[in-house]
Image: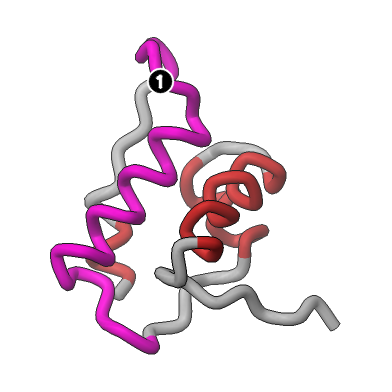
């Protein structure tokens, strides 16, 4: 799974926001099967560090994926 996350590419100079780019990257990895069903994604904090973005950016990127049923959000405590 970590290898799949290596494919995520964010361009700070792009017209799409980092949230949009991260959402699209993760959606693509899920849809093409690079991230298999029931694979646990790293914590949002860890993803923020990996992609050099804020925790809030990761949270906002995951929200539409959760709403679409592509990811399940874990509890925080």
Which residue is the extreme one toward the right?
Answer: 77
Percent across and percent down for residue 21 are 39, 34
Q: Is residue 57 left or right of residue 52?
A: right
Percent across and percent down for residue 72 are 54, 77
Residue 20 versus residue 37 in the image, above or below: above
Q: Residue placed at 47% from the left, 44% from the top?
A: 51
Q: Quadrant of the C terminus?
A: bottom right
Q: Residue placed at 34% from the left, 43% from the top?
A: 24
Q: Quadrant of the N terminus?
A: bottom left
Percent across and percent down for residue 6 are 27, 55
Q: Is residue 13 left or right of residue 59?
A: left
**Towards the viewer: 43 or 20:** 20
Q: Residue placed at 47% from the left, 59% from the top?
A: 65
Q: Is residue 8 left or right of residue 70?
A: left
**Towards the viewer: 29 or 43:** 29
Name the residue tied to disc 1. 16
Residue 30 versus residue 62 in the image, above or below: below
Task: Count the labels in the image.
Answer: 1
Where disc 1 sits, the SS reads loop
Q: Residue placed at 62% from the left, 40% from the top?
A: 57
Residues in magenta, as a range? 12-38
Residue 14 highlighted magenta (yes or no): yes
Residue 43 versus residue 14 in the image, above or below: below
- Image quarter of residue 29: bottom left
Identify the coloring.
Answer: secondary structure
Percent across and percent down for residue 3 are 24, 66
Residue 69 versus residue 16 in the image, above or below: below
């Amino acid at each position: 799974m970590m290898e799949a996350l290596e494919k995520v590419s964010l361009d700070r100079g792009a017209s799409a926001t980092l949230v949009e780019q991260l959402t699209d990257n993760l959606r693509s990895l899920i849809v093409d099967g690079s991230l298999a069903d029931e694979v646990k994604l790293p914590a949002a904090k860890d993803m923020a560090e990996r992609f050099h973005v804020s925790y809030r950016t990761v949270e906002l990127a995951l929200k539409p994926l959760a709403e679409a049923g592509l990811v399940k959000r874990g509890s925080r405590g």
